[in-house]
Image (cartoon, rainbow, N blue to C red):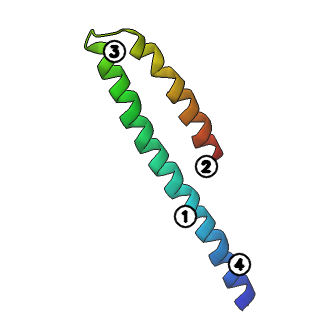
Amino acid sequence: MDRKLKHLDFIQSAINRLSTNSFLLKGWSVVLISALFALGASGSNGKFILLAYIPALVFWGLDGYF
């Protein structure tokens, strides 16, 4: 019985670690993509709007991994 509880604790710690990584990744993606869209919308350079799609795809792939 003790081995089963220890195994469940191990699985739960892995789940917690992955969910923390996913949460932090989503936070960074919102900040980075919002900043790029804001730079593109300010009229300085419209290429920032197109550039914002690259990290969005990268973060999407990383979120799928975690």
**Percent of width and height locating residue 32:** 39, 33
Q: Amino acid at mark 2?
A: Phe
At a point 40% along the width and 16% down the height, the residue shown is 48
Q: Amino acid at mark 1?
A: Asn
User: Which residue is labeled 4 in the image?
Assistant: 7
**Earlier sequence position, callout 4 versus callout 3:** 4
Distance (Cα) linking label 1 and label 2? 11 Å
User: Which residue is labeled 1 in the image?
Assistant: 16
> Foreground residue, 44 or 5?
44
Label 4 residue SS: helix
Distance (Cα) linking label 4 and label 1? 14 Å
Q: Is residue 13 left or right of residue 52?
A: right
Label 3 residue SS: helix
Residue 66 tag number: 2
Label 2 residue SS: loop
At a point 37% along the width and 8% down the height, the residue shown is 46
At a point 63% along the width and 77% down the height, the residue shown is 9
Marks 1 and 2 close (CB-CB < 8 Å)? no
